[in-house]
Structure formats: C-alpha cells, structure tokens
Amino acid sequence: MLDKLVGSRLRAKLIGWLFARPDERFFVRQLTGLLSEDSTNISRELARLAEMGILVCQEEGRQKYYQANAQCAVFDELRGLALKTAGMADIMREALSPLGNHVASAFLYGSQASGAATSTSDVDLLVVGDVDETALHSAVSRAEERLHRRVNYTLLSRQEFKRRKREIGGFVARILKGPKIAILGVANEL
C-alpha cells in the first residue's frame, strides 16, 4: 500500500524502515544489507528524500547518515503509515503467516501502536487462536531478528480471549480500547 502511495517500492521500504525507527540513523551500506536492495538505488532515493525534507542527512567524515526528519510537517503521518504498512506490521505478518489458520487474530499494541515507541522500545504482540506455542516462539524469534527488537507476545485461545474480553478493566479490555495495529484478523470480531 505505501509503495502505491509514494510511487516507488524502494521509497516505501526506506520510509517504512526509517520512520519505524525514528531515533536511529543509518548509512547506505547498512540499509543495503537490511533491505536487500542495490546501494546505488538506495543512495539515489535517500538523497531525494533528504532533498524533500523527509529525511535528515548528516555527514561524518566520508560517511553519510540518514534518519527520519522529526521536524518534517508530515512526520507523524509517515510514522503511522510506516508502522502500519511497511514496517513492523509487514515483518510480523510475514513471520506469523506460516502459522496459517491457527491464528484467528494478531495485533500490536502498546508503545508501537500508540506512536510513543523509541529505538529501544520492545514490541507488544497479542495472538489469538489455537497455535502451537513452540511454532509461535519460532516465528516471533524470526521477527525479532529482522526488527532488531524484543517481541513480547501473549497467546490466548479464542475462548480465553472471549472470556477475558468481558472482564471490565482487564488486560484484554484495556488493549482493545487502546491503539492497535492489526497484523492478522480483526480483534473486535472475535
């Protein structure tokens, strides 16, 4: 979705990566490895984004570092889009997809969903369904490697989720009232 909005798959990947980690800065070679893209194309696109004021470019010696521009007029919007479409959500969706129909719903909550996350914030994930916990742990570990962040997950069966959803002020009820980023399924339909 973000690639269609910004007109380029590579631009979407860069915005997704950099705005999902606004406190971190990266140089071209790092991004080449992290995003599995050609360094020439990455360099060209980073320069364009910096010229537009979307990114900040800092030179240290012969190295150029790029970072999301927190002063950009559309910073909050790009960060929200990045987290929902091109950043963490896609990585988590890809990691959980091998679990198939065993996952009824999965979503991020907490600081990542509210936009209050920093570069050191962990990721809070709620998974609902009849999932083998060993398989889930393996999937989450893959996501942690790609995100370079710890993922704290809670696994609930559908029945447990429904029961806990009715508890006023309980864990699940609080999560459902707060900001969420859907990964799979829709939590409110369970």
Image: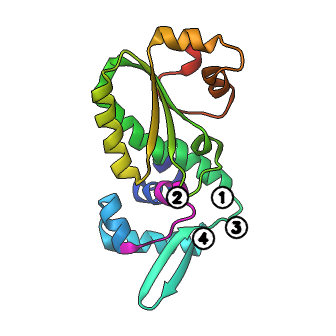
CB-based contact (under 8 Å), mark 3 and mark 2: no
Q: Which residue is mark 2?
A: 21
**Picture coordinates of residue 160, whole percent (x, y):** 50, 11
Q: CA distance from mark 4 to mark 2?
A: 19 Å
Q: Which residue is mark 1?
A: 75
Mark 4 is on which residue type?
Met
Q: CA distance from mark 3 to mark 1?
A: 7 Å
Is disc 3 surrounded by few (<14), some (14 to 19) or many (20+) residues within 10 Å?
A: few
Mark 2 is on which residue type?
Arg
Disc 1 on helix, strand or loop? helix
Mark 1 is on which residue type?
Phe
Q: Does the segment drawn in magenta span residue 19?
A: yes
**Picture coordinates of residue 89, whole percent (x, y):** 47, 40
State the residue in front, 182 or 158: 158
Q: Does the segment drawn in magenta span residue 117?
A: no
Residue 145 visible within the image: yes
Between marks 3 and 2 in the image, the one whose residue lies nearer the viewer: 2
CB-based contact (under 8 Å), mark 3 and mark 1: yes
Between marks 3 and 4 in the image, the one whose residue lies nearer the viewer: 3
Q: Is residue 66 left or right of residue 73?
A: left
Between marks 1 and 2 in the image, the one whose residue lies nearer the viewer: 2
Q: CA distance from mark 3 to mark 2?
A: 15 Å
Is disc 4 surrounded by few (<14), some (14 to 19) or many (20+) residues within 10 Å?
A: few
- Residue 90 vs 176, above or below: the answer is below
Q: CA distance from mark 3 to mark 4?
A: 12 Å
Disc 2 on helix, strand or loop? loop
In this picture, which residue range is highlighted in magenta?
16-28
**Picture coordinates of residue 96, whole percent (x, y):** 35, 32
Q: Which residue is mark 3?
A: 71
